[in-house]
Image: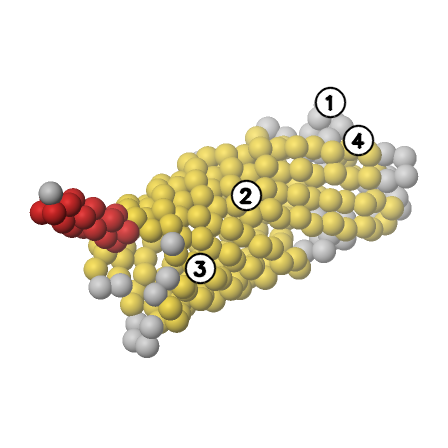
Amino acid sequence: MRRLLTAVLAVTAVFVFQSRAMALLEVDARYWFSELDAELRVTEGGLIGTTIDMDRDLGVDTDENFLEGRVTLQMGKHRVRYAFVPLSWDGSKTITKTINFAGKTYSASTAVTTSLDVDYHRLGYEYDFIKVAGNRVGVIAEVKVFNIDASLKSATVSESESITVGFPTLGVGFELGLPMLFSIGGELTGITYGGDAYFVDGEVGINLKPLPLVVLSGGYRYMKLYAETDDDRVELTLDGPFVMLRAGF
């Protein structure tokens, strides 16, 4: 009986050790110091929309900072992750030209209040075909979804429009170990549908691992979305530095 109990405990210990070695849950909190460059055109009811520069035409404050959350499950060379970042901008301006937006007209010299909200979801899988001694290189397949809500309001006219843009992307990711607990890592994902739509999201950063399951990082990120269908168009460019805290479990 004692031998059987010892064997069971030994097998259990090996199983738990191997499971912890092969599976690791990582949670990232990222703070992004970003700058926006955006244009939007929405046609409705036969009224061709005006191509609107959110900063120049509507006075939207394009320098905003955002918090992003990421959850990654590692299983050996396999990584499954989900990321979400809510983006939001506001502005107000007495417009200097007539704007047609979603079937409504805002005349020049009208005071207009604008809001632009974007929820960015990412669900992806990465396979690291090289993973050794703190170094890895992998391929990434992701589904990315943008929920975009834009609204323009004046004293007499108010209109809002919701657009959902989703597509699969492919890319690569890497991490290169450096001396003194440092590493450099990055990734690039994207897709193109010719001149009608394309997307790219890339980042690079320097990582510090002060504790076994804790990573501090700082880097730079660039993201661009372009989609055009008939008389509707959206173009968003977002870039800037970021800082990150990662905890493993």
| Label 3 Cα crowd, 10 Å radius (few <14 / some 14-19 / many 20+) | some
Chain-order first, disc 2 or disc 1 = 1
Q: Position of residue 92 (x, y in %)?
A: 81, 50
Which residue does the numbered mark 1 point to in the structure image? 45
The single residue placed furthest to the bottom in the displayed view is 180
Q: Nearer the viewer, mark 1 or mark 3?
A: 3
Label 1: state its secondary structure. Answer: loop
Tag 4: residue type? Lys
The residue located at (51%, 41%) in the rendering is 121
Which mark sits nearer the N-terminus, 3 or 4? 4
Which disc, if any, is residue 120?
2
Q: CA distance from mark 1 to mark 4?
A: 9 Å
Label ID, residue 104: 4
- Distance Cα–Cα, label 4 vs label 2: 27 Å
Q: Amino acid at mark 1?
A: Gly
**Label 3 sits on what residue type?**
Arg
Query: Of discs 4 and 2, which sits in the foreground?
Result: 2
Mark sitting earlier along the chain (1/4): 1
